[in-house]
Image (spheres, rainbow, N blue to C red):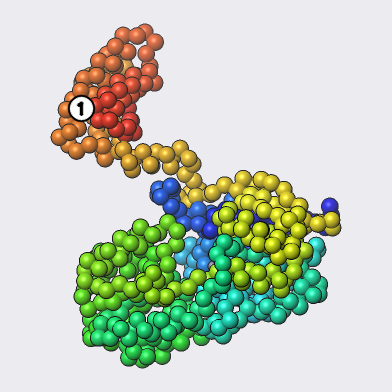
Amino acid sequence: MANEVTITFLGGLGDIGRNCAAIETDEALLLLDCGQLFAGEEQPGVDSILPDVDYLFERKDKIVGCLVTHGHEDHIGAIAHVLDRGLEFPIYGSAFTLGLVRYRCEERDVLGRTRLVQVADDETRQIGPFSVEFLPVTHSVPGGLISAITTPQGLVLHSSDFKLDPHPVDGRRTNLPRIGALAEDPGIRLLLADSTNSDIPGSTASESSMGANLADVFRAAQGRRVITACFASHMHRVQQIVDAALDDGRKIATLGLSMRKNVALARSLGLLKIPDPAFFDIENVDDFDPGEVCVISTGSQGEERSSLATAASGTSRWITIGEHDTVILSSHPIPGNEERVAKMMDDLIRRGAEVVHSGLVEIHTSGHGKRDELTTLHTVSRPEWFVPVHGEYRHLVAHKLLAESLGLSPDRTLLAQDGDQVVLADDGLSLRRDVTSGAHQMLNGRFLGPDRGVLDERRILGQQGFVQIVATVDFAEARQVCDPWVESRGWLDGDDAEDIEAEIVMLVGEAIDKELRNPEWDRASLMRKARRAAGTCVNSRSNRRPMLVPVIIDI
Ligand SMILES: [Zn+2]
Ligand SMILES: [Zn+2]
């Protein structure tokens, strides 16, 4: 149909991460976020996981711009990569979001491939055939924006990551009245809304309610050094930590590159208020009495090389943790990081620190709205059609059921997944499955990949090690020049390996001699025989299955 609009989900529907959607007419494609997913234990050695960006490269001449709803990595983390690989487009977002995008683009030296277009709250921009109104929304980072996108098929409202905080720290509330007005006129054709907390009843606590609890913790830590950690982009939390510290007569230092850069950015934009005299450089931390200091650090997720984790393990250049320290984790481990955070807490406590975390005192609240807030959004926006986004499968399903319980007919709520496309046409919304593969695209250094085979090899190497068998053969004479030898890494301790290696040398030597008497022998058959002889011995004697690497040297 001539004027249909499609939305293709290139990530974010099935995992929490790599949010990216392409909104298209015949002639134009508008990107809605372009984030990354952090690799887990299942992807050893992978730097990050990208949306399925092949779809974008196939349509690179159509791209009119990218809206970035807010500055979290799951929304901006793939931008520098796709620019680096050859795409070019302007990026629209709030001042703080674009500041973070700028850092990422500078790191990859790709700023020249884009134009950063700052938009103000409630501003409308024409981007190709789309008219986009940007509305303020509350979330756990400053400058979040709801996008109200006027398309040839009516208004598409994207909630961004949101909660409905009645008392935001910066006073910038979600513009629900405007959503109500848009619902009235022209009406909202399609709602795409955050599903992260759709299976949790109630509403999320206001960010500003953390301040009093943080102040209590600071009061209890009087005379002790306070080291706090939270997400490095969470400037509302940082502001409340700063306020509690200043009330307690402390001075502030940041620890960790991203915290330092983000605090500088937020201060330059007037989003974070810290008087200059209250600020000192972390390298002077030992000049102060413990009770005069508050350090604000990265590493709340226990990431291995983060500032707090290195302090906990005793390898920090700046901070030596001891009995005079109170460490406040103003965060909650995101799924998958629980063990790392637990280990870091053990390390901190072993060094004598007192650790206060969000399980003990309410010093963290989510940035995502729970069921009551989602209910409010649905009630105010009254969309004709709804697609739940931003969530794992169970969150998407819970959100669909919630929308139905609020009166939306089940056939008006489509459950899409990564790789699917929804089509908005005169006769309504329909779903096309698997328009693109939806596959995880992994970033391996500067390369896309590795594929399954290489990941499997990494897992075997990580868990079982490898055994290499080298045989030296005079091909012209069809005879072995010397005994084979064996090299191994990560397989068995030296003494245990020695006996088995001697046996491998003997068995492989015999197998190769035997094969060389076969008139059909060649390099491949020698490798096969060497592998088989070594493998039988390795498996039966060590009861392990290391990677076997036969090498035949021809002299
Ligand atoms: Zn977010
Ligand atoms: Zn997100």
Q: Is residue 315 left or right of residue 196?
A: left
Q: Is residue 146 left or right of residue 218?
A: right
Q: In the rendered view, tell whether residue 352 sits above or below residue 417.
A: below
User: Is disc 1 surrounded by few (<14), some (14 to 19) or many (20+) residues within 10 Å?
Assistant: some
Residue with the most extreme left position: 495
Question: On the image, numbered disc 1 is attached to which residue?
Answer: 500
Position of residue 77 measured from the top left corner of the image (x, y, whole percent): 52, 62
Between 50 and 160, the residue placed more toward the observer is: 160
Position of residue 66 measured from the top left corner of the image (x, y, whole percent): 64, 65
Under circle 1, the secondary element is helix
- Cβ of disc 1 within 8 Å of ligand 2? no
At x 36% / y 21%, what residue is drawn?
Answer: 528
Position of residue 365 measured from the top left corner of the image (x, y, whole percent): 48, 73
How many numbered marks are there?
A: 1
- Can you see residue 56? no
Position of residue 45 measured from the top left corner of the image (x, y, whole percent): 40, 49
- Quadrant where the C terminus sits is top left
At x 74% / y 64%, what residue is drawn?
Answer: 407
At x 58% / y 58%, what residue is drawn?
Answer: 395
Between 492 and 102, the residue placed more toward the observer is: 492
